[in-house]
Image (spheres, rainbow, N blue to C red):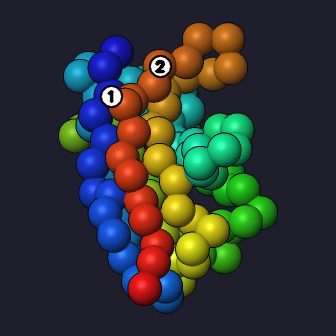
Amino acid sequence: VQLQASGGGLVQPGGSLRLSCVASESVHSSIHMGWFRQAPGKEREFVASLRSGRDPRYAASVEDRATISRDNAKKSVYLQLNRLQPEDTAIYYCFAGGPDNRYWGRGTQVTVSS
């Protein structure tokens, strides 16, 4: 499975972005799709995931500002991020699968700066 993320960019603090990720083939709804991010000099960290259209999971750092959604017909997962802060600056990677068998996209850069 190949994953292509998009939607990153430069945004001012307090702004919003919607990240999109499309898979090259269908990902069964029971399989997690979601997002990690990696800030400069830091390890990659979990952001959000979703499977079967329910049970969204969020990192504590974004749970009150993020909404993950999925459209299985479009083979896509989305991440809406609101009230962005400079500490949200990172490359955002979408993924599909579990810890033992995970596919990664190339990532999309999100920069939060005034």
Q: Earlier in the sequence, mark 1 or mark 2?
A: 1
Would you name the residue on which mark 2 appears? Answer: 103
> Which of these two is toward me, 105 or 75?
105
Q: Residue 64: x percent and y percent? A: 66, 76
State whether residue 74 is above or below residue 78: above
| Mark 2 neighbour density, 10 Å: few (under 14) some (14–19) many (20 or more) | some
Q: Residue at x 39, y 29 (%)?
A: 105
Q: Residue at x 69, y 44 (%)?
A: 42
- Mark carried by residue 3: 1
Q: Secondary structure at mark 2?
A: strand
State whether residue 70 is above or below residue 64: above
67 sits to left or right of 26: right
Could you tell me if residue 49 is visible in this image? no
Question: Dots 1 and 2: beta carbons under 8 Å?
Answer: yes
Query: Residue 74's quadrant in the figure?
Result: top left
Q: Residue at x 52, y 42 (%)?
A: 34
Q: Residue 102: x percent and y percent? A: 55, 18
25 sits to left or right of 13: left
Could you tell me if residue 6 is visible in this image? yes
Q: Residue at x 47, y 39 (%)?
A: 93
